[in-house]
Image: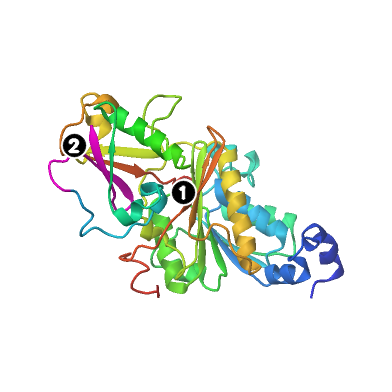
Amino acid sequence: MKVVIMPGFSELMIVINPTGEVTREGMLSIIMPWFYAPWPGSQEKGVIEMTVPGDTLRALLTELSKRYRQANVDFEPINPGTNDLDFDYDVLVNSKNYVALDNGLDAKLKADDTVKVKVLWRWDG
Amino acid sequence: MLDESELIRYNRQLIIPDFGEEGQEKIKDSHAVIVGVGGLGCVSASYLTAAGVGHITIVDSDIVELPDLNRQVLYGEDDVGKKKVIVAKRKLSRLNSKVEITPVFAKITEENVLNLIDGAHVVVDGLDNSAARLVVNSACVKQRIAYIYGGVSRLRGMVTTIIPGKTPCLACLNPEGVGGLGVLGVTPAIIASLQALEAIKLLTDRSPALAGKLLLFNGDYMKFQLLEMRRNESCPVCSSTLPR
């Protein structure tokens, strides 16, 4: 599937097989540049397009992890120990938490679905 | 001026290049406020006391409970049921009697926070929830006091140093997540030690390494990451009150 990645406010936003143009127009500033744009030139470009092998949420997150690793950014939303989402992150598809999807991480994504990946903060003391 | 006993006591840090007596005197003349003396605050308070910070205020509204003892190393079984700040003061004073320890038994609120941090050179986070942290963050921005955020869950932790007007504040980052996930005792010890290091660097006019950066610790896989963050131009807390 083709995906377009753009920085949200404090989250990563990914549009799946977009049927229209995807731009950052009107969006807030980027506060976590490492999260969005570890690739040279990507911040100037505004959005990043890439092809992901497979059509599931898991395939998307796995491919992203691989691409970030190539850019020396440790972004591993799928915990290799549990094979589920790591608790440092949350993932929503069309504003719905991934656990509420029929097949969870193995849910198939369709055109114009919007995936948001959030980094979760630690609050215990 | 440091007296003879202080020159002996702090010898191991006095001989650090660029620290010396000047650095020790700065620490001695400093006031640190530690908000929360739980897993994080017990450790940061211990190291700041040992380092010779002249005045430390500790704020907490809890009593010691048995489940605290896996990580809150200032307390023992005999302290269960006692006010944390009172026990902590006693233990910290035994560690370094020359440090003035002010215990405040209070819950942090929007109404009292400005009084609680008044006169502080640095505020060190030892809290256990997001709401109180955001209250402290706003007050520190308002008073232009450096605030060292630290948070943990399980075997994971985060630290960042917030310098109002220079770095993103906590509200800039729209932090999300839940607490109550459990904590392994050594995790807050690691994070609070880093907070104490940042505090000492700030108090001695050294550049804090975590200003504008978020340090992530992952004890499951023993990974540390240092990530850049930027101020939010539309931050409801710091964008309108502080220069860019």
The x, y position of residue B36, in whole percent, is 52, 54
Q: Which mark is residue A17?
A: 2
Is B128 included in the stretch rendered in magenta?
A: no
What kind of residue is marked 2? Asn
**Image quadrant in which you'd find residue B33:** bottom right
Disc 1 packing (10 Å; few <14; some 14–19; many ≥20): many
Disc 2/disc 1 C-alpha distance (Å): 41 Å
**Image quadrant in which you'd find residue A116:** top left
Residue under circle 1?
Answer: B128
Query: Is residue B86 in view from this perspective?
Result: no
Point 29% across, 32% down: residue: A52
Picture layout, residue B124 above or below residue B55:
above
What kind of residue is marked 1? Asp
Instruction: Give the residue furthest to the left.
Output: A19
Magenta extent: A1-21
Point 44% across, 71% down: residue: B165
Nearer to us of marks 2 and 1 is 2
The chain ID associated with circle 1 is B
Label 2 element class = loop
Picture layout, residue A96 above or below residue B103:
above
**Image quadrant in which you'd find residue A3:** top left
Label 1 element class = loop
The chain ID associated with circle 2 is A
Horizontal arrangement in the rendering, residue A20 relative to residue B31 (left or right): left
Q: Are marks 2 and 1 on the same chain?
A: no
The x, y position of residue A98, in whole percent, is 26, 33
Point 80% across, 72% down: residue: B2
The x, y position of residue B82, in whole percent, is 58, 48
Horizontal arrangement in the rendering, residue B12 relative to residue B187 (left or right): right
The x, y position of residue A49, in whole percent, is 27, 42
